[in-house]
Image: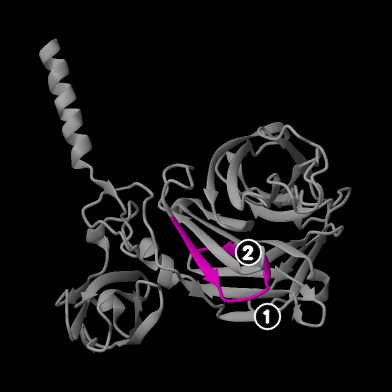
Amino acid sequence: MKKLFFLFFVCQSWLLNAQIVGCTDPMAVNYNAQAIINDGSCTYLSTSINPLTSVLLDSCLIETSGLTFWNNLIWTINDDTDTSIYGLDSLSGMVSEKITLPNVTNHDWEEISQDSNYFYIGDFGNNASGNRTDLKILRISKNSFLSGVQQIDTIAFSYYTQTDFTNQGSNNTDFDCEAFIVGVDSIYLFTKQWVGLKTTVFSIPKTPGIYVAQPKDSLDVGGLITAATYLESKKIVVLTGYSKTLSPFFYLLYDFQDHNFFSGNKRKVDIGLSYHQIEGVTTTNGLSVYCSNEKFTYGSIINNPQKLHTFDLSSILGYYICSDIGRENIKTRPLVHLFPNPTSNILSIFVSSEFLNHAYTIVNSRGRTVLSGKIFTENTIIDVNKLKTGCYFVKIEGTQCAISKFIKR
């Protein structure tokens, strides 16, 4: 029996040692090509991104707070006393639908989310004094949403770690919240911490009741988290927020384990919109992302009206989404091969027929496009001699997408 136990111990130790842990993201500066298990250690160069488009929203949405995409519209709410939900055209930002909820109060609506059966509206803004005892999430049946007689129930909660309910003054609490996501069986709250400039994930059930939100983990984001969107099948959470000087950013969480959102890659991306109070974010694929900002003015110096912005994150998340990380068998994917790799001057892109007549882009490790063109033959030759030494990615999008990495020497 002792011999069997010893052999079991040796085999287990060998298996653990064989599973190399480290940074598995080729976009990171500390990428480990030998690593199989992502340990969340990836670090990244500073990156910023600008919107592809920005359109003005109607004056009824100067307090827009929260976005979610459903039924071909982007739905948003206001964080004041308004009890309506607005459906926006994703291209023009024009209001196409307006649904007013009956018999509810908007104390401080800060986020809207959904699952396959319900909309969820977070009435949990708590920055005025930090001592609210009526935090709640409204749950609206989708089947009743457009009927004119909405079925609404309530999920009430308090924070397990909050014991002091004295008035903390304006913007002086770590128990504010403006972002949450909905999983298969739970709601996950991401706090907006005015003092610590971190975010803590709390979880509660997503069924009606009164709960004590349990803390899971915290992350130092260096700012105020104001919105979240979730692609559960792809293990991607996109958070957005801003610094205390209103410099907005994305915080991208991906390739995490289970619902431990901070266990995988954590990448901060600055948004090139100074003095914008970004309050909503949504996406359907992780690549095209919509954000909204509420109106912000400062005397006669700053006047940023409410807008809907679109962003392309394919240069940042494209490799992860298009690769076979635990989701597809690489043998079933169309062929994209780069040669020679590494290269000094000439790069040949060999593709299968699926990618003919499709555009390619080459991005650097900061996610910036450095070259682009079109694939006309199965062997496209590109002059990369003028590129700086480093790591680059070739992205081709057709009926499927593919991203391959090469090294420029």
Give whichever of 14, 99 is nearer the camera: 14
**Residue located beneath label 2 in the image:** 242
On the image, which quarter does residue 27 sit in? bottom left
Taking the image as shown, residue 77 lies to the left or right of residue 15, namely: right
Quarter of the picture holding the C terminus: bottom left
Give whichever of 280, 378 is nearer the camera: 280
Magenta range is 266-285
Give the secondary structure at mark 2: strand
Q: Residue furthest right?
A: 103
Q: Residue furthest top?
A: 1
Can residue 287 be seen in this snapshot?
A: yes
- The structure residue drawn at horizontal position 22% and vertical position 80%, both measured from the top left corner, is 349
Instruction: Say which mark, if any, is on residue 44.
Output: none
**Residue located beneath label 1 in the image:** 55
- The structure residue drawn at horizontal position 26% and vertical position 70%, both measured from the top left corner, is 405
What percent of the width, then of the height, locates residue 333?
27, 64
Q: Is the magenta stretch mostly helix, strand or loop?
A: strand
Give the secondary structure at mark 1: strand
Residue 273 colored in magenta in the image: yes
Residue 73 colored in magenta in the image: no
On the image, which quarter does residue 61 sit in? bottom right
Q: Earlier in the sequence, mark 1 or mark 2?
A: 1
What percent of the width, then of the height, locates residue 247?
62, 69
Taking the image as shown, residue 156 lies to the left or right of residue 71, namely: right
What percent of the width, then of the height, locates residue 194?
68, 52
Taking the image as shown, residue 284 lies to the left or right of residue 408, namely: right
- The structure residue drawn at horizontal position 84% and vertical position 57%, both measured from the top left corner, is 83
Q: In this view, does 401 lie above or below 253?
A: below
Question: Mark 2 packing: few (<14 Cα in 10 Å), some, or many (20+)?
Answer: many
Q: In this view, does 59 lie above or below 102?
A: below
Q: How many tags in the picture?
A: 2
- The residue type indicated by label 1 comes to Val
